[in-house]
Amino acid sequence: MKITGNVWKFGNDVDTDLIIPARYLNTSDPAELAKHCMEDADPSFAGKVGKGDIIVGGKNFGCGSSREHAPIAIKAAGVSCVIAGSFARIFYRNAFNMGLPILECEKTDEFKTGDRLSVDFDTGEIVLLESRKSYSTKAIPPFMQELVQSGGLMKYIAKRIK
Amino acid sequence: MGMTITEKILAAHAGLERVEPGDLINAKVDIALGNDITAPIAIKQFYESGAKKVYDKSRVILVPDHFVPNKDIQSAMQAKMLRDFAYEQELTYFFDAGEMGVEHALLPEKGLVLPGDVVIGADSHTCTYGGLGAFATGIGSTDLAAAMITGEVWLKVPETIKFVYKGKLNNWVEGKDLILYTIGNIGVDGALYKAMEITGPVIESLGMAGRLTMANMAIEAGAKNGIITPDKITEKYVSSRAVRKYSFYKSDRDANYAEVIEYDVSDIEPQVACPHLPENTKGISQVGDIRIDQVVIGSCTNGRIEDLRSAAAVIKGKKAAKGVRLIIIPATPHIYRTALKEGLFEIFLDAGAIISPPTCGPCLGGHMGILAKGERAVSTTNRNFVGRMGHPESEVYLSNPAVAAASAVLGKIGDPADVV
């Protein structure tokens, strides 16, 4: 699976309170959560992010709470994948379980807001379209891609049971 | 090659002789835990999967503690989802209304999480139970749903970093200061994906409250779990309250560690974590003149009776400075009652404090003490992220209860030694 999207760049240690502040956790409705995605990092984010766009962060993306509302909000905002230097472990698990693909890339400091990237989940290759520069990351194994395409772990399991 | 305590507990729960870091295992879950924010998603998924019954009604525990007493209609709906599910599934342990406490203070107090357990909770501070010598880690709602159905969880065996605390504790230095100092030293991702094994002579004489506080904040260094070898202090704490049998594990002498880090605690003064990351720590003498609007003493990190005693000892006979809102949140009904009996409420009320019912409340900016734009709080909680306690332009400074109490009296961040 291959996607192309515009980059929205954030820094290191983007925590789950930045991704979706707790004041909105009185619901788990994806559309409602999407309206407040990244609000405390960039209040205008939800209004300007486009379908298929890519969030890029530095190290330790998603640190903090176990709230699955964080990957739900990102996915429902239309974001196609998150690329970061490293991910906090609960967020890492939650993202795949929610069907949001994420990739670890050491060179995220070379990407900036407005860049266009193409990402090939089969090979793990990221290409910066303007310069054609290529970055290699770990491929997402086929079963994990199927999990993502099914819409998350529970839907993936339901499909397999049928 | 020997094994660490974390590896031993995981091996035992996976039915294996031994495990090594990096191994993927399927582990039996002793307790699966959810709260009023995370369990609603898990409950939805439970039903959508076609499941009818939880794997064991005495091992799935629900505690609506974050936005309760219900802060608004939507929060009330979420808490009701837990209540309805708990009654339908006939859960043995569902803590509501006057029985409700902050989950990570409540479960150890009730003897429901025990040494040697594997505990998973859809709450990042589930790692608290490592203070009892359990393997405990936070997971998301989906993993909770799967565990509620199967009683199992897949895990990658983490590498372990061993922390050794030596020397003599300075006055007013508590478990909170040791863990803040450690996070300041290794950073908020310093133990990413790893186990933090908290050891040394200082820990061997640290009480259970301090141990739970230290394990509680392992997640703030990115760790999968924090763990302390159970001993006589643990035995004394759990023996009278345990609802099941439990096992003490300890690391082998030749266990393998990714790293061993030693601290001489004689060098450590009370710590304050400045905005907006728990790693931004300073010794109290280095903080400078920081005026404050609010002080919160409570939470799964520092809302135990020992914490309230420590705060009361500082504030006794004094008043919170004019303009400072001092909010005390005993973490469980038992702690609340004990504080009342011991006369601590008298001390707090004389100081002008507000005493809240048990709740996570302001710790995550829920309710019961939200900050306005530009306001500053000193809090005994665990996170000081942007907007954590309210407005995105408010600030949270993390400290131990004695420092928080001293700060309330002074109206600025201050040293208990300057107040008592």
Image (spheres, rainbow, N blue to C red):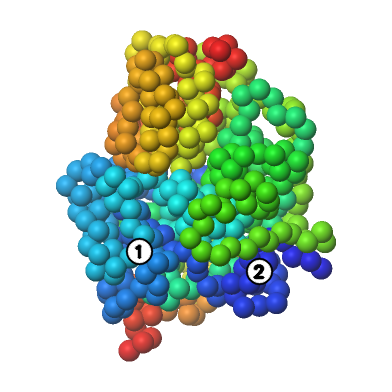
| Residue shown at 76% from the left, 41% from the top | B201
User: Which residue bears the numbered disc 2?
Assistant: B22
Name the image quarter holding residue B175.
top right
- In the displayed structure, B282 sits above or below B409; it is below
Viewer-proximal residue among B31 and A77: B31
Residue A53's spot in the image, x, y percent? 37, 58
Viewer-proximal residue among B395 and B304: B304
Kind of residue at badge 2: Gly
Give the quadrant of the C terminus of chain B: top right
Drawn side of residue B239 relative to residue B346, left or right? right
| Neighbours of disc 1 within 10 Å: few (<14), some (14-19), many (20+) | some
Kind of residue at badge 1: Thr
Q: In the rendering, which numbered label is found on residue B140?
A: none
Residue B58's spot in the image, x, y percent? 40, 67
Drawn side of residue B128 relative to residue B19, left or right? left
Q: How many marks?
A: 2
Name the image quarter holding residue B319.
top left
Viewer-proximal residue among B385 and B105: B105
Q: Mark 2 — on which chain does it sit?
A: B
User: Which residue bears the numbered disc 1?
Assistant: B92
Question: Which residue lies most toward the left here?
Answer: B73
